[in-house]
Amino acid sequence: MFVRIVKMGFEPSKIDEFLSDFEAVKHQIRAFEGCQFLELYRDKHNTNQFFTYSYWNSEADLEQYRHSDLFKSVWAKTKPLFNTKPEAWSVDKVVTLK
């Protein structure tokens, strides 16, 4: 399992549209084969910056999602709302404390 972090910056006037779109698809993304966890974060000070944080069973599962009709439809709606290029990282968890 690994963690995928995506940083997205939105035009301030487009944030409500993004949140509405995310609300409509979040359960479909989470239910996609190989996705074990999904959260959305918002920066406390730069409030047009958002981050998705998801756990995937394998890179193949993430790639299958990234090539799916679901991702293509989500990305087609989301991409025009950006005010900066999104950034993404695939990372392995090293330590977890509870």
Image: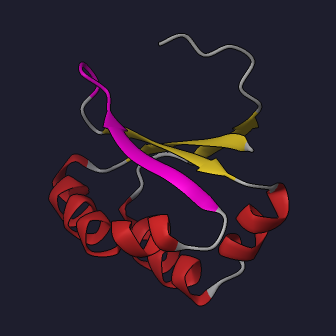
Query: In the figure, is residue 60 to the left or right of 22?
Result: right
Report which quarter residue 46 is drawn in.
Answer: top left
The answer to which of 16 and 90 lies nearer the viewer is 90
Q: Considering only vertical position in the picture, is 24 above or below 87?
A: below
**Residue at 35% in and 74% down:** 25
In the image, 32: left or right of 64? left
Examine the rendered structure and indicate whether residue 56 appears above or below residue 30.
Answer: above
Q: Is residue 11 above or below residue 43?
A: below
Residue 64 percent location from the top left of the image: 75, 75
In the image as oriented, which residue stretches furthest toward the bottom? 69
Image quadrant containing the N terminus: top right
**Residue 87 percent coordinates (x, y):** 62, 42
The percent coordinates of residue 37 (x first, y second) are 50, 50
Number of numbered discs overlaid on the protein picture: 0
Front-lying residue, 22 or 49: 22
Counting from the top left corner in percent of width and height, residue 18 is at 28, 62
- The correct choice, above or below, for 94 with respect to 58 in the image is above
Residue at the spot 63% in from the left edge and 73% down from the top edge: 33
85 inside magenta stretch:
no
Magenta-colored segment: predominant secondary structure: strand
The magenta-colored residue range is 35-46
Residue 71 lies in what quarter of the image?
A: bottom right
